[in-house]
Image (cartoon, grey):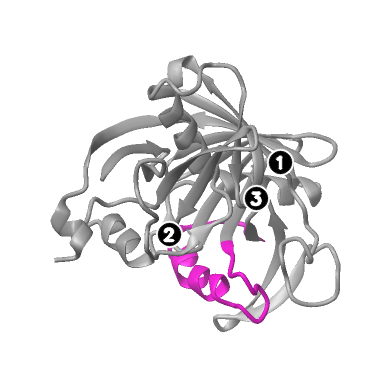
Amino acid sequence: MRFWKYQALGNDYIVMDGREQALLAPDLVRRICDRHFGVGSDGILRHEGEQGGAIGLRIYNPDGSEAEKSGNGLRIFARYLFDRGLVGDAPFAVSTPGGRVSCRVLDGGLRVEVEMGRVSFSSRDIPVVGPEREVLEETLAIGGETVVFSAATVGNPHCVILREKVGEAEACRLGPLLENHTALFPNRTNVQFVQVWNEREIQIEIWERGAGYTLASGSSSCAAAAVAHRLGRVGPEITVHMPGGDLRVSLDAKMHARQVGPVRAVATGEVAAELLAGT
């Protein structure tokens, strides 16, 4: 089983060509993604081939579950397609379970731009339990405290909490509690803790659904920036600072999000038969 590995701001993915390989069972995904006993990654991107005028993509989390969409994953997938000569530097469409997006490879693959689609705050779209509404600045008692949160979807669910200061410790403490609060978030959720620096910059810490504490996330950046913008804290052009690096997010008047950021190649190789067999 051949693989290509890339990282985008420290968020690393393995890419596999599903046109050549069988479907990935959850236990195999977990073995491959394991950083001690496997290849190690924050997930697997499976190239699905042509799908109605777009290139199909399935996204696997390291716990074996599937994600609807991934911003960093899409940038990595675009770079993989470019490196294999399957796309050039013109925009092209990628189909994900979270919707179709447009990608464009820049600077010979060093940067990738992704039109992520429209950000929605609707409880029905995200989804969030309760009456249909925009989920903005609601309160929730969790982890021995009351937090004020907003929620959004960019094709996958996000819970956004604005703080005066953010850090890894809080993300790791409250993140898993919020991710798995299925009484409120029936599909679980990604979680971002956001510190607004000024009208053009925010800093975020991320707890990613199915992956845990994460150095960077493209969809999380878009969701966090969109919530901060919707609440009047930032403008439409935002630099998102994360532990893994910075990402540029732009929002138009209808809340369509675009992200631009780096991608770097890490390795190519083959998964050993022993790992595939689980021996």
Residue at 54% across / 75% down in the picture? 180
The number of numbered discs placed on residues in the rendered structure image is 3
What separation in Å lies between label 2 and label 1 (alpha carbons)? 25 Å
Q: Which mark is residue 224?
A: 3
Q: Please give the name of the residue rendered at 80% of the width and 61% of the height, measured from the top-left corner.
A: 122
Q: Residues within 10 Å of mark 3 (few under 14, many from 20)?
A: many
Mark 2 Cα-neighbour bin, 10 Å: few <14, some 14–19, many ≥20 = some
Task: Check disc 3 and give the amino acid type.
Answer: Ala
Q: Is residue 238 visible?
A: no
At label 2, the amino acid type is Tyr
Give percent across and percent down for residue 214.
43, 54
Q: Nearer the viewer, mark 1 or mark 3?
A: 1
Which secondary structure lies at badge 3?
helix
In the rendered image, which residue does mark 2 sit on? 213
Q: State which tag comes first along the sequence, 3 or 2.
A: 2
Disc 1 marks which residue? Answer: 117
- Residue 68 appears in the rendering: yes
